[in-house]
Image (spheres, coloured by chain):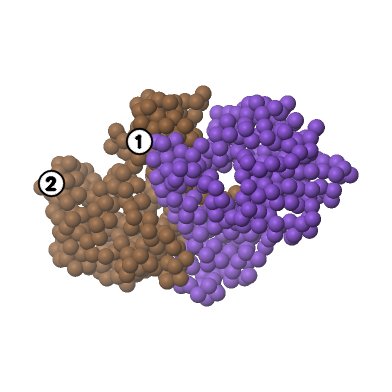
Chain colours: A purple, B brown
Amino acid sequence: MTAQPSAPSPELFFRSINAYQLTHALKGALDLDVFTAIAEGQTTAKALAESRQASERGMRILCDYLTATGFLTKANSNYGLTPDSAMFLDRRLPSFVGHSAEFLLSPTLAQSFDDVAAAVRKGGTVISEEGTMSHDNPVWVKFARAMQPLAFGMAQALTGAIKLDPDKKTKVLDIAASHGLYGLSFAQQYPNLEVVAVDWANVLEVGRENAARFGAADRWRALPGSAFDVDFGEGFDLALIPNFFHHFDPPTSEKLMQKIHAALGPGGRAVTVEFVPNEERTEPPHSVTFALVMLASTAHGDAYTFGEYEKMFAHAGFSRSELIQLPVAFEQVIVSYK
Amino acid sequence: MTAQPSAPSPELFFRSINAYQLTHALKGALDLDVFTAIAEGQTTAKALAESRQASERGMRILCDYLTATGFLTKANSNYGLTPDSAMFLDRRLPSFVGHSAEFLLSPTLAQSFDDVAAAVRKGGTVISEEGTMSHDNPVWVKFARAMQPLAFGMAQALTGAIKLDPDKKTKVLDIAASHGLYGLSFAQQYPNLEVVAVDWANVLEVGRENAARFGAADRWRALPGSAFDVDFGEGFDLALIPNFFHHFDPPTSEKLMQKIHAALGPGGRAVTVEFVPNEERTEPPHSVTFALVMLASTAHGDAYTFGEYEKMFAHAGFSRSELIQLPVAFEQVIVSYK
């Protein structure tokens, strides 16, 4: 829309109400593996259509859409990949993040957004009593497999930010370990480090595969069950809690953090990876908007501020907590000291 | 996401694959009429929750989401409307555009995006043989009612751009008139102007209501039926074709434009309102992306370039065509001279 910046415009409304089309166009492009085809040198609508058994007209319209929305470049009717698309949407690369659509657009999550007004009225998910937090919900196996590439960069950045003594035998407790990448990233960096990974048994199978892939199978132990119920053991140097607290209300997280506090040895640290908005909850965008995913898909989840976490963790016995913003990350990190 | 502008990032992918959440959040806000409540002075999550029989927690999370996505402001836990939201999302105002969601998110349109890959493979809609172009499809009644406020500004801008002789008796042919606002906007401006409006009979009932509302009932005549079949009559000074050609293939539009050419008197003009991308189809964004809506919901529709329209209209007998960009508009205008 061409508009004076000062004149009110319905442009944002129009673009936003149609935003679902962007999700589905991108999903269609992944289904057809268009980005990989372009990386392989099919750069015209005709060549792309031939390589994907699709119509040229359909391919041209889809690729123009992807160009207008920032995923492709176009010059002289030839499409190209942007640097982002070249790194993250080429299926041949380990950095390919397209599999995350299998979790992010899974029927469970998509359904939770069908009636946002109902979730706002109720103050929590309307898809079932506990939403995605029901015991052994298979959506978390999907999560573990689909979200690995997105988590990988974050896990690497975290390992760079949290320093450990490489000569000391170190024990790490990985809570809701999922694909296991957070703990395994530390195991890869520190040869004397052992990981105990807690999650549902079916989910931990994904972590076990990754432990083998990381060459750390002998230093990685699965502890299946609910983090609220299983016995962690004790003497841990580090507890990792990536993307877990946002599913619960503060008393529940406080209780778990007490249990973690007890499992840590002297000088132990708890490291929380989370979507942490500022205290007014206006920034950063991904952390603010993530709260709606929790409202829609869980009974009590939220994106808590640092002030809220600080209070919960102090109640749980930690002496102090600090907020860290990693250089490239959707999420924030809180380090809490025993 | 905090990132160096030069480092590749999965941020655009992540934001885009989740874009459907923006659609549903906005729909939820309209369902709860949050914007009107804020305009009426309910500016805290608590006050908004009370006025809308909703939970405070849910209302806070929704309004934070709307703040992060540009629809609201927030300071000291008080929400406010942006200038755009104040004008277009307050249900008490005639400029309220929220009803458009009833068309834009109608099951027919939403369903057409369920499998974009299938539409790309086929080269057209997979929802039915003709998609939204089937005879008397009730989605067009919904369109006529829901899209009026968005069309109103465009119709006013068009009336300002196309000059007529106010003293002369003028006949306007309004093709696929829908809500009738394009023809009626001219009727309102020119007291000697008469409109013949063509559309499905059920759709024209909406136009008839508007003709009465515009005080032009005696100068507005409904001509029900398919624009391809009905007899337009002759001697028209102006033919308006707003948002119609994009549903068809070029030969079909050419045939219709021939019929329009015959219905125009000497010196007559045909005015096409359309999403017209540039020849490379890279800009403007709304006109480029609109082609995907046509691919997904019609058998042969597209967003044609000016070059393509120029050719069709020349074939249909018009001496020349010119492209006009109205100052504030999602769409472009083509004026063709007999």
Q: Tell which tag, 1 or 2, sits nearer the viewer.
A: 1
Q: Chain of mark 2?
A: B
Q: Label 1's element?
A: loop
Q: Is residue A218 left or right of residue B281?
A: right
B270 versus A264 height, above or below? below
Residue to which mark 2 is pinned: B217
Disc 2 marks a residue whose amino acid type is Ala
Q: Position of residue A168 (x, y in %)?
A: 87, 43
Q: Which mark is residue B233?
A: none
Name the outermost residue toward the left: B218
Q: CA distance from mark 1 to mark 2?
A: 33 Å
Q: Nearer the viewer, residue A300 or B138?
A: A300
Q: Chain of mark 1?
A: B
Q: Residue at x 53, y 72 (%)?
A: A52
Q: Is residue A245 left or right of residue A195?
A: left
Q: Is residue A213 visible?
A: yes
Q: Is residue A227 left or right of residue B337?
A: right
Disc 1 marks a residue whose amino acid type is Asp
